[in-house]
Image (tube, grey):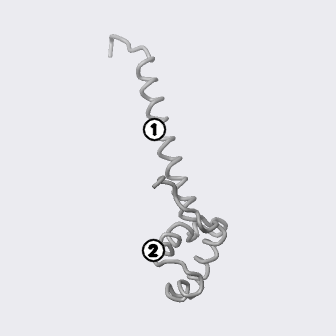
Amino acid sequence: MTGKKNNKYSSEFKQTIVNLYHSGKSYSQIHQEYGVSHSALANWIKQYSEVQIDDDTVLTAQQIKALQKRNAQLEEENLILKKAIAIFTPHSDKD
């Protein structure tokens, strides 16, 4: 086993299947019509379902995950900068 995911289906296909699910098709109907397994559909629903943030903003779970990852990276960089400031800022003996 190579450890790579089998990208049998395109992102567009996955999004279409998730949209079908949200429009009322059941897991079994989707499985019968498209051959998508229950576990794959469950994963795709988590990954491609949209969340409406406000009137103008709709994000997918993928986008939210990417934003969380970027936020964690920025928080880590911020912490490093704070530590650097503490190291390079001179302290007076009167404190």
Q: Position of residue 84 (x, y in %)?
A: 45, 23
Q: Point out which mark residue 32 bears.
A: none
Q: Position of residue 55 (x, y in %)?
A: 64, 70
Q: Where is residue 43 in the image (x, y as percent from the top left)?
A: 48, 69
Dot 2 falls on a residue whose secondary structure is helix
State the residue in front, 62 or 51.
Answer: 62
The N terminus lies in quadrant: bottom left
Q: In the displayed structure, does residue 8 sit left or right of residue 68?
A: right
Residue that carries the numbered disc 1 in the rendered image: 76
Which residue is found at the position 51% from the left and 75% from the top?
Answer: 41
Dot 2 crowding, Cα within 10 Å, few <14, some 14–19, many 20+: few
Which residue is found at the position 64% from the left and 72% from the top?
Answer: 13
Q: How far apart are marks 1 and 2 (CA)?
A: 35 Å
Residue that carries the numbered disc 2 in the rendered image: 39
User: Where, by quadrant of the figure, is residue 39 drawn?
Assistant: bottom left
Dot 1 falls on a residue whose secondary structure is helix
User: Where, by quadrant of the figure, is residue 35 drawn?
Assistant: bottom right
User: Disc 1 marks which amino acid?
Assistant: Glu
User: Disc 2 marks which amino acid?
Assistant: Ser
Which residue is found at the position 57% from the left and 59% from the top?
Answer: 63
Dot 1 crowding, Cα within 10 Å, few <14, some 14–19, many 20+: few
Which residue is found at the position 57% from the left and 68% from the top?
Answer: 48
For marks 1 and 2, give the one nearer the viewer: 2
Q: Where is residue 10 in the image (x, y as percent from the top left)?
A: 64, 66
Looking at the image, residue 94 lies above or below residue 14: above
Circles 1 and 2, Cβ within 8 Å, touching? The answer is: no
